[in-house]
Image (cartoon, helix red, strand yellow):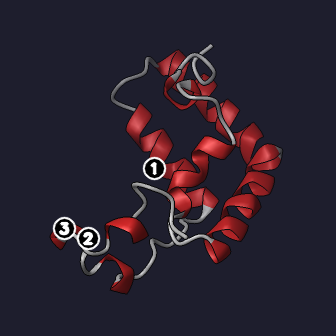
Amino acid sequence: MAAAGSIDSNASKPTWKHQPKLPSLPVPALADTMKRYLRSCEPLYTADELAHTKAVVADFMKSDGPELQAIIEDKAATERNWVRIHNHFWPCGMCTAQQWAVE
């Protein structure tokens, strides 16, 4: 049984009518995600902040990144909407806090 407010429970509504027929979003490769993240930081950060963020990303790619990527890929294999699974990993608001990358 679908949870209240889920896509499946809204399938009879015109906006969601064809949702079950659409393919799931692919999981982007970790390296691609990190490149996009760094590119999005470039216009916002100072040179020092960007250098620090690049170092943090490099460390993440060697440490927690591959493990977290594997978790997301595993969830994508079993969950129709893997994008929403972030709530299982991080408390609300943590994803929007920038200080972890620019300290």
Residues tagged 1 and 2 counted as in contact (Cβ below 8 A): no
Q: In the rendered structure, find residue 68 and report the number of the disc placed on it.
A: none
From the top left corner, tell me how far across and down residue 11 is, in percent. Answer: 31, 74
Which one is closest to the eye, mark 3 or mark 1? 3
> Sequence-wise, which precedes: disc 1 or disc 2?
2
Look at discs 1 and 2 and give the one toward the viewer.
Answer: 2
Q: Residue at x 52, y 21 (%)?
A: 98
Q: Of label 3 and label 1, which has the lower sequence position?
A: 3
In the image, residue 81 sits, relative to residue 83, either above or below, namely: below
- Identify the residue at horizontal 38%, vertical 81% (top origin): 20
* Residue 15: assigned label: 3
Give how far across and how far down residue 101 sits, in percent: 60, 24
Q: Could you say which is closer to the camera, residue 74 or residue 38?
A: 74
Distance (Cα) linking label 3 and label 2: 4 Å
Discs 3, 2 touching: Cβ within 8 Å: yes
Q: Nearer the viewer, residue 98 or 9?
A: 9
Q: Nearer the viewer, residue 85 or 96?
A: 85
Task: Locate residue 41: give its quadrant.
Answer: top left
Residue 19 horizontal/vertical position (percent): 32, 76
Name the residue rendered at 68%, 31% in the picture.
56
User: Which residue is outermost to the left?
Assistant: 14
Q: Secondary structure at mark 3?
A: helix
Name the kind of residue labelled 3 in the image.
Thr
In what element is the residue under mark 1? helix
Label 2 secondary element: helix
Q: Is residue 43 left or right of residue 27?
A: left
Q: Give amino acid for label 2.
A: Trp
Q: CA distance from mark 1 to mark 2?
A: 30 Å
Label 1 sits on residue: 36
How many badges with numbers are in the image?
3
Determine which residue is flagged by label 2: 16
